[in-house]
Amino acid sequence: MGIALKLGDYIKDLMPGVQVIYTRDKDYFVELHERAAIANRNGADLFISIHCNSAPKAPEVHGTETYVMGLHKSRENLEVAMRENAVIAFEADYQTNYDGFDPNDPQGHIIFSLYQNAYIAQSIKFASLLEKQFKYRAGRSSRGVKQEGFLVLYKTTMPAVLIESGFLSNKAEEKYLRTDEGQSLIASAIYRAFKEYKQLVEAQ
């Protein structure tokens, strides 16, 4: 959450004409469908979901990843999507909110990944700018742009990305992500990518 709050501060301070809307600004759970609904209700132009990754069976794995809605490309990526989507089990009426989706069924994730996303090109462009900034601005190891069926992106009606800012299962990366400097560098990289993306969109 520290990265998201720092990003919001950068945008509000350096782009006063841009309205920042948080799905939450304190440490409490917001249902995945409600996160998209908040963006949709406010007519947002871009949805950014910021997370930390984990690979407990491979603690040496490190680096950033940025996801957009799309087809699953590998078993590893499917497992990441299943971990992220599993939190809907905490929601009271998740089967209704997510059209009968079962977070424990791999087939359900594949079906979700087939939904059309009218903003896929813009999402991929922004994701590419993000990974470039993570590598060159923040000095992180970029694991690239990937396409997955994350529920938090599923019902958004605007370009949307899910950022994995690093692996908490990697001790060195966990330490970095817990520092104010690390969070500031990641937030700064996201801000710079957002600024570049905004300029590209407005130039069209």
Image (cartoon, helix red, strand yellow):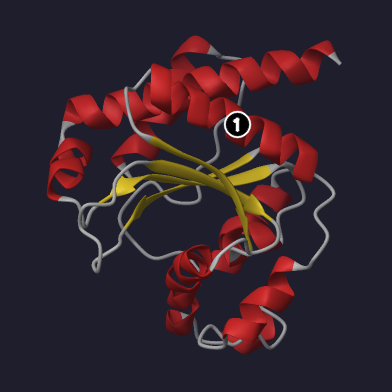
Q: Is residue 21 above or below residue 195?
A: below
Q: Is residue 9 visible?
A: no
**In the image, residue 107 lies at what x, y percent?**
65, 84
Q: Nearer the viewer, residue 91 or 118?
A: 118
Q: Nearer the viewer, residue 155 or 150?
A: 150
Q: Is residue 140 left or right of residue 143?
A: left
Q: Is residue 71 above or below residue 97?
A: above
Residue displayed at 42% across by 29% down: 7
Residue displayed at 35% across by 55% down: 53
**In the image, residue 14 lies at what x, y percent?**
49, 11
Q: Nearer the viewer, residue 33 or 118?
A: 118
Q: Name the residue tied to disc 1.
A: 128
- Residue 195, by quadrant, is top right
**In the image, residue 175 lies at what x, y percent?**
13, 41
The secondary element bearing badge 1 is classed as helix
Which amino acid lies under the numbered mark 1 shown in the image of this protein? Ser
Residue displayed at 79% across by 66% down: 115
Q: Is residue 183 left or right of residue 191?
A: left
Point out the image quarter for the N terminus.
top left
Point out the image quarter for the C terminus.
top right
